[in-house]
Image (spheres, rainbow, N blue to C red):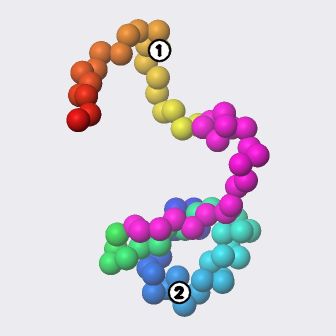
Amino acid sequence: MPGSQISKTEFKARALEYFRQIEASGDPVIVTDHGKPTLEVRPYRGLERDPLQVLRGTVLRYDAPTEPVDVEWEAGQ
């Protein structure tokens, strides 16, 4: 079920079944509206987790971490 997508109509009809599957597997479900993803239903994870653990695996690539960042910034008005 990882990355599963279901319509709002299907989710409404089988919500308890999906809740049980999500709780058991830990995998989120994407709910769609007219084919567009609108919601993600996933298990609750408390805030007592280590912030570094939450971010682990989210950086895909980090080139030249000691080099200056060459980006032009626009000041907000």
Image-quadrant location for residue 18? bottom right
Q: State if disc 1 and disc 2 touch (CB < 8 Å).
A: no
Residue at image point 66% right, 82% down = 17
Residue type for callout 1? Pro
Task: Give the percent coordinates (x, y) of residue 73.
Answer: 26, 24
**Left or right position of 64 against 46:** left
Q: Which residue is mark 2?
A: 12
Viewer-proximal residue, 22 or 53? 53
How would you rate the neighbour count of disc 2 (Cα within 10 Å): few for under 14, some for 14-19, many for 20 or more? few
Residue at image point 33% right, 78% down = 34
User: Dot 1: what SS?
Assistant: loop
Residue type for callout 2? Lys
Viewer-proximal residue, 45 or 63? 45
Q: Which residue is mark 1?
A: 65
**Left or right position of 13 against 61:** right
Task: Give the percent coordinates (x, y) of residue 23.
Answer: 71, 68
Task: Give the percent coordinates (x, y) of residue 65.
Answer: 47, 14
Q: Residue furthest bottom?
A: 13
Marks 2 and 1, Cα distance to the nearest angstrom? 47 Å
Residue at image point 51% right, 65% down = 40
User: Along the polypeptide, which appears first: circle 2 or circle 1?
Assistant: 2
Task: Give the percent coordinates (x, y) of residue 39.
Answer: 47, 68
Q: Residue furthest right?
A: 48
Viewer-proximal residue, 62 or 44? 44
Viewer-proximal residue, 61 or 53? 53
Does residue 27 show up magenta in the picture? Answer: no
Residue 31 numbered mark, or none: none
**What is the magenta range?**
37-56
